[in-house]
Image: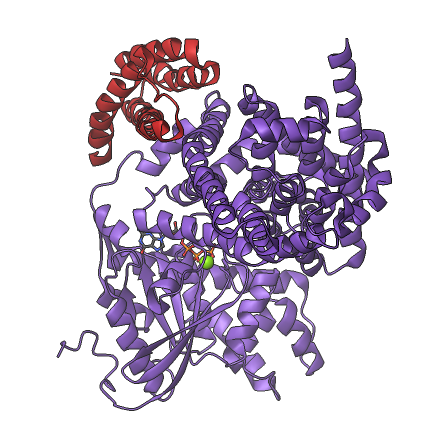
Amino acid sequence: MNLVMFLLTALSGILEFWNDRLLGFFILVISLVFLFGCFEKQRERYRAHLFVGSVLVLFFAGFSLISYLVSFLMPLLGEEPKSLTLGDAVLVSSGFISILNVYRGRRK
Amino acid sequence: MRPVRHGLCQVADKKGSGEVRVALVGCPNVGKTSLFNALTGSKQYVANWPGVTVEKKEGVFLHKGFRISVIDLPGTYALDYNSLDEKITRDYILSGEPDLIVLVGDSVNPEQSLYLLLEIVEMEKKVILALTAYDEAKKMGIKIDKYELQKHLGVPVVLVSSITGEGLEELKDLIVDYSARKGVLHKVHLDYGEAMEKRIREVLNNLTDLPIGAPPRYFAMKYLSGDTQFYQEALKSGLPELSEEERIAFKISLSKKKRELIENVIKEAYQSSEEKVLSLSEAIDHVLTHKFLSFPLFFAFMYLVFKFTFETAQVFSDLLDLAFTNLGNLLVERLGENAISSFMADGLISGVGSVLTFVPNIFFLFLAMGFLEESGYLPRAAFVMDRIMEKFKLSGRSFMSLLLGFGCNVSSVMSTRVIDDPKERLVTILISPFMSCSARLPVYLLILRIFFPHASAALLFSLYTLSILITLLSSSFINWLFYRGRSSPLIIELPRYRFPTFRNLYLYTWNRGKHFLKKAGTIILLASIAIWFLTYFPGNGNVEESFSASIGKALTWIFKPFDYSWKITLSLFYGAVAKEVIVSSITMLYNFDEVELETARSVLGLEMDPVKAFTFLVFVMAYIPCIATVATIYSETNSLKWTLFSVLYSFGIAYSLSLLVYKIGGLVVRS
Ligand SMILES: Nc1nc2c(ncn2[C@@H]2O[C@H](COP(=O)(O)OP(=O)(O)OP(=O)(O)O)[C@@H](O)[C@H]2O)c(=O)[nH]1
Ligand SMILES: [Mg+2]
């Protein structure tokens, strides 16, 4: 699972990188949490990486979702609302998987 | 009627009225303040790291006709006489002022709390044990038998949760009942074994007079274990000196016996479902304090906070701005151009409104900080940064205080009280005003949006980075200047991670944000009115002939090298009251509405180029702390010398730094 999450977040990190360097960079940092998780032998630790990484993905995905929603207010100021990029989409979808991970992680 | 639950107190339902004073005592971060808030309905500062409460706070609630005042004390791990907190708490307990003590303990990890309880029991005070965060214990599958606890400890026990409200009524009943009783419930007598008991008896036989408040047995034990306060008292009253080995040995045996007892009690009263290899908090810590990941993750958090505060909140700020501008225009339209409409539109709306515009940014910032503080990440960040801080002669503990400075410098100065090493504490106090507080944010945003509409995020980031750099370098410098010492190692208890409840976050954000709103309604309002008067008269609206102009022009020599106009100089001068006032004065002196960036740019652009504008921001970032911070520095250091030093030093740094930026910027732009 760590591997899947790593691939997903790394992908969205790279995609975000085109629009927003820093955002992309920090999503890549998050993907490292999963990457390191892949090499953990102990089961608990393996899960720990998955859990924490997923929470972090949720933060980032939540953030991009919120800023997308908030941008609907922009027309009031006479500006265009943001459009959802491909990177955002991947990020948000890995956010959904994260919800599952977090839910399972909490119960254990 | 509720059934009698504990059978220990039977004076219930004694109708009457009276005053009861209850002190909340307990280890740091167990949830004393949360309990205090839940009991009294107050909204004191709660956060998930040890050392939040630094001052005694009092609140009141009514129950069964009694008026119960509750005193929330700073947390202490022990009641020796070694640190300031310990002294304050112990003196307060022994003073006999509180009628009753509620020892607040942690349900999940009760060891240290029970240790503290035994100390108080030996002081022969009325004490109730309230094990809080019971909701968390239940969630973790921990079963607590409170009757077993009562049996062994001889004090009434309640299991409470400040979050769900469970057990609160029971605690209130217990407080009323117990306080109405004469004397202590049981005189619990911990038996320390024949040898030690003999020593205690010997001392008791020789004891003639007693320092007020301390029961004889307690006094004897403190004397034998060489307590800083009571040992001296004992010598004065004629008891013989003891060798140091003897004192230490006695002290160790005392605490060993207590620990044994506690271990037993817990074994009897606690039942937890099967042991986990790694608890949730440990699991999270494994990643967040990971060798390679901890550092980048810290920055990822900071980045998210930053993004959230500036980007997401910005839309709301812009909307507010639009509203205020329209309001001002409407007023002028209705009332015509005269002194009154100018007072309303230029004085009140553009003075206070220009600052209020930034309310969303500031609330979002506090929301994010609330998350950091409530989740329990803050002390971890201190841990992660400790190694770096060491290079600057600080510890991670100072880093925690400094980080709070992003919200408000006053709170970071206050929070240094828990830093044990006095030198490190002083240095932290002196450098903390350099952390860029939320009041400076409006100034940055205003100027950056006018002069650097496309690079404002990057420049804002650089201002914050600069502020951290100056803070750290100042620490090295001040240390080099006065101490040439070393930093103390970081010892800090890592709290459990908690997912912040909505209510807690709301309370935190609202409390902090309210402070900002209050400031807008008082200091900034008054300053705006004053500035409006000074700017409107005697020229009747002609700024160039106003009092402000005279003051400003008299001050321009200070900024000769920067070539600042008198208006800019004056805004810095007024801004010494509170940094937000800079925004009010600029909008008033130049008479523009923020929303019309084009006009603002053309007006300000006559006197400032981008380099000057950025220099100005660097100056604003570092120059003298606001009045509230200066007052706090004075009250915390108790020294005029250091307060003055702080003001002059920061002014000096701001001046030289911005001059440097000005010269370099000039070179870059011209070439
Ligand atoms: N779940 C849960 N959390 C609690 C409860 N009581 C307190 N907390 C949390 O525990 C943390 C510490 O609470 P405080 O009330 O600030 O603790 P304190 O004892 O006043 O701490 P200091 O002032 O630092 O000594 C906060 O994160 C609270 O939200 C409780 O009953 N249940
Ligand atoms: Mg507290």
Q: Residue at x 72, y 32 (%)?
A: B473
Colour scheme? by chain
Q: Residue at x 39, y 67 (%)?
A: B103
Q: How many marks?
A: 0
Q: Quadrant of the C terminus of chain B?
A: top right
Q: Position of residue B141 (x, y in %)?
A: 21, 47
Q: Position of residue A59 (x, y in %)?
A: 34, 29
Q: Residue at x 38, y 86 (%)?
A: B183
Whether residue B117 can be seen here: yes
State left or right for residue B146 relative to residue B309: left
Q: Is residue B548 above or below residue B238?
A: above
Q: Position of residue B643 (x, y in %)?
A: 76, 53
Chain drawn red in the picture? A
Q: Is residue A24 above or below residue B503?
A: above
Q: Quadrant of the N terminus of chain B?
A: bottom left
Rendering quarter of residue B127: bottom left
Q: Position of residue B227 (x, y in %)?
A: 61, 67
Please tell me which residue lies in front, B66 or B126.
B66
Please tell me which residue lies in front, B470 or B523.
B523
Per the rendering, the colour in which chain B appears is: purple
